[in-house]
Amino acid sequence: MGWWQISADTLADSRFVVSPLAETLASLSTLERAVSAHPRERAWLERWLPAYRRLRSDDPLSARIIRTALAPRWSADFLTPTPVPPPPGRPPATFAQELERVRATPPDRARADLAESLRGPLPAALDRDDLARRSADVLEWVWTHTVEPEWPARRRILEADVIARAAQLSRGGWAEAIDGMRPGMRWLGESRLQINTYDNPPRELGGAQLVFTPVTADVGWVCWDIPHRYGVVYPCSGALADTGRAPVPQALGALIGPARAGVLVLLASPLSTTQLVALTGQGLGSVGRHLRVLLDAGLVRRRRDGRSVLYFRTAAGDGLLRAAG
């Protein structure tokens, strides 16, 4: 199996990062596989797969580069740069800034990475200097047409997953936050992180930074910028990816208001105020007022979990939802 030896300093400096480039690459992988993992993704795929197939037909060379770069077992490293956490007080990198790292890949490195994905020498058709540029152009098309229009909603889903992982981390340590993050990944103890089930030699991360990045597609990969940074891209919580915003029964929305009803629907499992803000897109003040009304009505309760206060539905809240259909 493949595992990383992680120092205490690396763990202490680990970060969760939302990356528009990683989300776009995950979406590109979904288009390449033409397989959806949940209803939201199925609707998205039905909408965009015909246009993507036309793009591939119009530019078969770029299509071949992407198909080779996204090999099932080993993606080309130049296509998967490790997300960089922003400095304190600075905004995160934009898609354009992240994409520039792909586009600026030296030709020799792009060829070497593509040969690694092939597990052999490059065919003559791919032995060229514009591999990175053509790959970046495809990523830019996927972002502009299929991801950017719904990026605010996707970002809320990803941020909610990060908040949930952070809560797991504070409650149960890295073992609880990491186990089940992606297939084959688990905390082994003794500063060892299993990242997959392949028979690869272990890696010593030393003082490198470890970055975890969620995506809404059911894909994942590892990446690195040796010796500074290692990354794990993982599919975010399935429940969040399945629905984005949970559906609200029309009758319940008419009774207590659609925004308040949306909060009640989400509280099938305990959530913090911050998580509810991320999931609903409502402001902190609005979510707080909805929770106060629901608490006073006996439809939700709250409990403290470490430094967080979690809200959850009561039996009365469950009954109201069942009655509303």
Image (cartoon, rainbow, N blue to C red):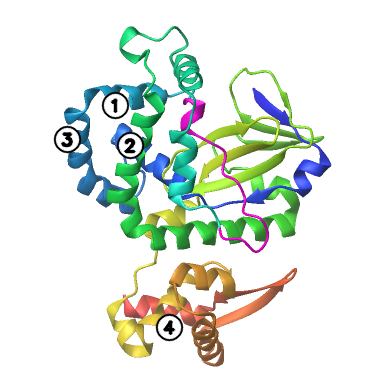
Segment tinted magenta in the rendering:
75-91
Q: Mark 1 points at which residue?
A: 62
Say which residue label 3 marks: 54
Place of residue 71 in the rendered image (x, y in percent of width and height, measured from the top left) = 41, 23
Q: Is mark 3 on a helix, strand or loop?
A: helix
Q: What residue type is labelled 2?
A: Asp
Report the residue marked by disc 2: 137
Look at the picture and state if 117 lies above or below 49.
above
Q: Nearer the viewer, mark 4 or mark 1?
A: 1
Q: Is mark 2 on a helix, strand or loop?
A: helix
Q: For the point 35% across and 27% down, which residue is it? A: 66
Identity of the residue drawn at 37% across and 21% down: 68
Q: Are marks 1 and 2 in contact (CB under 8 Å)?
A: yes
Could you tell whether 197 is left or right of 247 in the image?
right
Image quarter hosting the C terminus: bottom left
Q: Which of marks 1 and 2 is nearer the N terminus?
A: 1
Within 10 Å of the Cα at label 1, are there few (<14), some (14-19), or many (20+) other Cα atoms? many
- Which of the two marks, 3 or 2, is nearer to us in this view? 2
Query: How packed is label 2: few (under 14 Cα within 10 Å), some, or many (20 or more)?
Result: some
Q: Which amino acid does label 4 sit on?
A: Arg
Q: Earlier in the sequence, mark 3 or mark 2?
A: 3
Residue 288, horizontal then vertical, whole percent: 55, 84
Q: Give the residue at x 35% y 8%.
A: 123
Q: Is residue 114 magenta?
A: no
Which of pointers 3 and 4 lies earlier in the amino acid sequence? Answer: 3
Along the polypeptide, which appears first: circle 1 or circle 3? 3
